[in-house]
Image: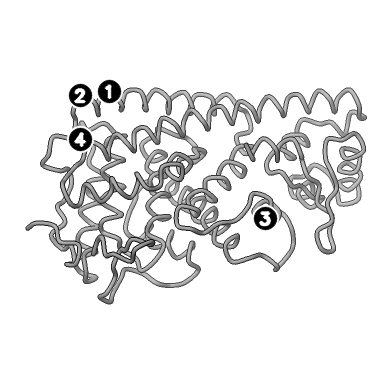
């Protein structure tokens, strides 16, 4: 059956495609992307406390993935909302924070049961959307060009059809055949987006699945790759190449696009981790020279690099200090210029300005 954008794509072919996908160009790109990803994983393993990478990089990934769907917030609004006790958070920032929560929940679920399943996809989208919606159970879903209103794709319709195609996708994900896992990642992402199983949140759920797949296959230990950055930078190409697979079966450009995204994200994330580590070590040495011994502890400096904004409760939760002492430590760090006090409602947050500037690059 030929593709018709106005007709539900219930004949969406399963995976792997019948077309030759392991072309010379694809295999060459897969080698380069795999090497870059391995270097990223290897660098992460050299950092004793990888928690310093989690919040900063995952929040950045959450913001970029949401921006692809035109849900836009700022770094400052995001980091403040993550750290402050406030209900005055704008809707876009709330959605980005929920993406971060969904990615982290998915990671822990995968560690408990290493299976990317329909049930896990549903849990992810429910966390993102904060509702109990599941598989699409009503007709009428269309994917349109946001500028022209033109219908460019009609995904499969009917919950039974959608569940069948998701089960086939699960089976393909679990198949331990010889296909390079990064090539397989590109196929999985297309298929999930083409099935479009939910009324909303498909793009963000699909991009979370990308990162979880890298963890499941052992290509990453932690979900600390900024994979949505190269996608947001080539957003029009991303959608055009997805459509090219649906309309013309044009797999090679799509697979190469995704392999390049993995390579670029790996290189960027690796450099970002190196920069964070260097800045943290520099800050630790400066604190050692300017502050009493108990204030410049390694644990304290690591904590102020877990996210740009810190408060006393974070030190208490980490077992570094009791409440009064925690406040004294943060004030001492502010007195020597490592942190800057920022009033947020009734509480004071302490901003690591150099980390904030680094994450904004």
Q: Residues within 10 Å of mark 1 (few under 14, many from 20)?
A: few
The Cα–Cα distance between marks 3 and 1, rounded to whole angstroms, is 41 Å
Q: Which residue is mark 4?
A: 177
* Position of 122 relative to 15 (above/below): below
The kind of secondary structure element at disc 2 is helix
Say if 79 sits above or below 149 in the image: above
Residue linked to disc 3: 77
> In which quarter of the view is residue 3 placed?
bottom left
Disc 3 versus disc 2: distance between alpha carbons? Answer: 45 Å
Give the residue displayed 26% in from the left and 56% down from the top: 194
| Residue occupying the point 21% across, 71% down | 158
- Tell me whether the residue at label 1 lies in contact with that at label 2, contact meaning CB atoms closer than 8 angstroms: yes
The residue beneath circle 1 is: 28
Question: Local crowd at mark 2 within 10 Å, few (<14), some, or many (≥20)?
Answer: few
The residue pinned by badge 2 equals 24
| SS label for mark 3 | helix
Whole-number angstrom distance, CA of label 4 to CA of label 2: 19 Å
Q: CA distance from mark 1 to mark 2?
A: 6 Å
Front one among 29 and 4: 4
């Amino acid at each position: 059956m030929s593709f018709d954008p106005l007709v539900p794509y219930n004949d969406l072919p399963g995976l792997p495609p019948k077309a030759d996908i392991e072309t010379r160009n694809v295999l060459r790109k897969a080698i380069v992307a795999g090497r870059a990803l391995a270097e990223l994983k290897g660098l992460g393993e050299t950092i004793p406390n990888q928690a310093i990478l989690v919040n900063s990089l995952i929040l950045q990934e959450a913001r970029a993935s949401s921006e692809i769907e035109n849900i836009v917030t700022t770094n400052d609004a995001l980091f403040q909302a993550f750290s402050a006790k406030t209900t005055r958070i704008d809707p876009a920032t709330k959605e980005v924070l929920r993406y971060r929560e969904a990615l982290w929940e998915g990671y822990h679920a995968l560690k408990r049961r290493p299976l990317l399943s329909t049930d896990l996809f549903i849990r992810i989208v429910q966390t993102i959307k904060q509702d109990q919606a599941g598989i699409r159970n009503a007709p009428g879903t269309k994917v349109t060009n946001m500028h022209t209103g033109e219908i460019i794709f009609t995904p499969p319709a009917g919950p039974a059809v959608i569940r069948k195609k998701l089960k086939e996708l699960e089976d393909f994900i679990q198949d331990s055949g010889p296909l390079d896992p990064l090539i397989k990642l590109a196929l999985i992402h297309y298929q999930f987006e083409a099935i479009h199983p939910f009324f909303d949140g498909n793009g963000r759920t699909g991009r979370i699945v990308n990162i979880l797949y890298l963890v499941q296959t052992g290509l990453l230990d932690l979900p600390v790759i900024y994979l949505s950055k190269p996608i947001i930078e080539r957003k029009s190409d991303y959608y055009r190449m997805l459509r090219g697979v649906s309309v013309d079966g044009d797999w090679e450009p799509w697979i190469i696009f995704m392999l390049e995204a993995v390579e670029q994200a790996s290189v960027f994330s690796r450099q970002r981790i190196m920069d964070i580590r260097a800045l943290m070590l520099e800050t630790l040495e400066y604190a050692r020279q300017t502050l009493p011994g108990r204030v410049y502890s390694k644990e304290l400096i690591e904590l102020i690099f877990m996210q740009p904004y810190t408060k006393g409760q974070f030190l208490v939760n980490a077992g570094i200090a009791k409440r009064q002492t925690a406040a004294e430590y943060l004030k001492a760090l502010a007195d020597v210029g490592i942190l800057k006090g920022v009033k947020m409602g009734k509480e004071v947050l302490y901003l690591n300005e150099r980390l904030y500037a680094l994450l904004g690059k």
